[in-house]
Amino acid sequence: MNRSEHRPSQSSFTWPLLIKTCSVALAVIVAAYLIGQHWLHVAGVLPFFFILLCPLMHLFMHGGHGGHGHDDTKDDDSGSSSPKTP
């Protein structure tokens, strides 16, 4: 069996990394330019963003505790303070 068939070539790893790096760098440059040139527009919308954020957080963050109207109590009396008789 030829071992060179199983080794990945070095060029297969460098091109995707180079493309990802250039894409991230381009996105950072574009974001910095847009924020720098249009900061007054962004600052004018920012209060409305926070007002909209409150109901959206309320809507999407309720997944952690089961939502409204669910009774998660157990049937056993392990939480009661009365002693159990044998």
Image (cartoon, rainbow, N blue to C red):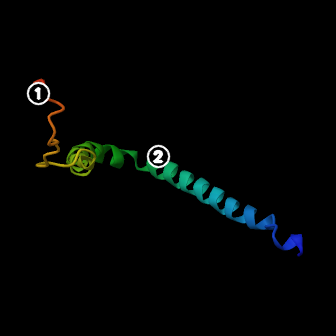
Q: Residues within 10 Å of mark 2 (few under 14, many from 20)?
A: few
The numbered disc on residue 85 is 1
Q: Is the residue 86 above or below the residue 57 in the image?
A: above
Q: Is the residue 13 above or below the residue 60 in the image?
A: below
Q: Are marks 2 and 1 in contact (CB under 8 Å)?
A: no
What amino acid type is highlighted by mark number 1? Answer: Thr
5 left or right of 68 in image: right
Residue depicted at x 14% and y 34%: 77
Residue depicted at x 81% and y 70%: 6
Task: Tell me residue 3's x, y (percent).
Answer: 88, 70
SS label for mark 2? helix
| Residue sitting nearer the eye, 23 or 65 | 65
Residue depicted at x 14% and y 49%: 70
| Residue sitting nearer the eye, 67 or 82 | 82
Task: Tell me residue 34's x, y (percent).
Answer: 46, 52
Read off the residue under disc 2: 36
Q: How many marks?
A: 2
Residue 22 image-quadrant placement: bottom right
